[in-house]
Amino acid sequence: MQIRELSIGGAFEITPRQFPDDRGTFWEWYRFGALAEAVGHPLDLRQGNGSVSRRGVVRGIHFADVPPSQAKYVTVTSGAVIDYVIDIRVGSPTFGEWEAVRLDAVDRRAVYIGEGLGHAFVSLEDDSTVTYLVSEVFNPGREHGVTPLDATVALEFPDEIGEPLLSPKDLDAPTLLEAEAAGLLPTWRSARDFTDSLDARWSARG
């Protein structure tokens, strides 16, 4: 597999090699050691999630308190989405910026979203199925959101999806600047200190 760091530090795009034959196709969609080498520490898998979304559904922007936050490894098993990684770390040189990666059942890419980053996606097809491996179990008291319609973040959705479909929770979530003012966002330093500690713990194991 090929692993490429995105413009948002702590996020990576993973493109697997596919091996088609007359039976179908085989590929590795996750490899522990390859990801750990790229990131600096492994994904400590604690929970697996899945979602099925109609065309035009937007989920996110979601994030969790640091520490421990919730790193995510996201891929699509059917359909297609545009996946967004958003830098919500106050003090980061790329604070408020984002990068998008298309995830679909053709290239079968995945995205790794490191601790302290925000995550969202928009479904491009009906029944788009997204699979997430995450580093922490869901803890509602530590989970937060920023509205994906925030003009400051300015996520770009494809015109062909029409009007984005959001949950009431995501629609009513604060803007990035409102979340910052309320003290909900992680800081660049807290996120870096936490991931540095994970890197050091992994390195010490040899």
Image (spheres, rainbow, N blue to C red):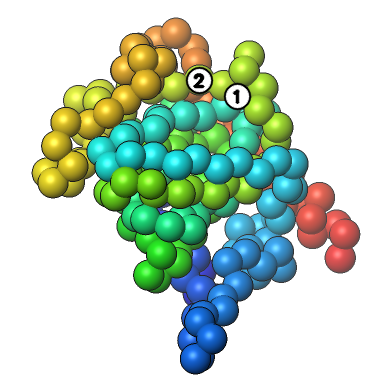
Residue, disc 1: 65
Label 2: state its secondary structure: strand
Residue 30 in view of the camera: yes
The amino acid type, in three-letter code, at marker 1 is Asp
Name the image quarter holding the N terminus: bottom right
Residue extending farthest to the bottom is 22
Q: Vertically, is 101 above or below 45?
A: below
- The residue positioned 60% from the left and 24% from the top of the image is 65
Image disc number at residue 47: none
The location of residue 175, given as percent across then percent down, is 32, 17
Q: Is residue 13 left or right of residue 55?
A: right
Q: Vertically, is 23 above or below 203?
A: below
Crowdedness near tag 2: few (<14), some (14–19) or many (≥20) residues, C-alpha within 10 Å: many
Q: Is residue 146 left or right of residue 20?
A: left
- The residue positioned 45% from the left and 64% from the top of the image is 109
- The residue positioned 40% from the left and 10% from the top of the image is 181
The location of residue 46, given as percent across then percent down, is 74, 41
Label 1: state its secondary structure: loop
Residue, disc 2: 144
If you read the primary sequence from the N terminus, does the residue marked by circle 1 or circle 2 appear first?
1
The amino acid type, in three-letter code, at marker 2 is His
The location of residue 22, given as percent across then percent down, is 49, 91
Name the image quarter holding the C terminus: bottom right
The location of residue 52, given as percent across then percent down, is 45, 42
Q: Vertically, is 61 above or below 5?
A: above
- Residue in the foreground of this view, choosing between 150 and 160: 160
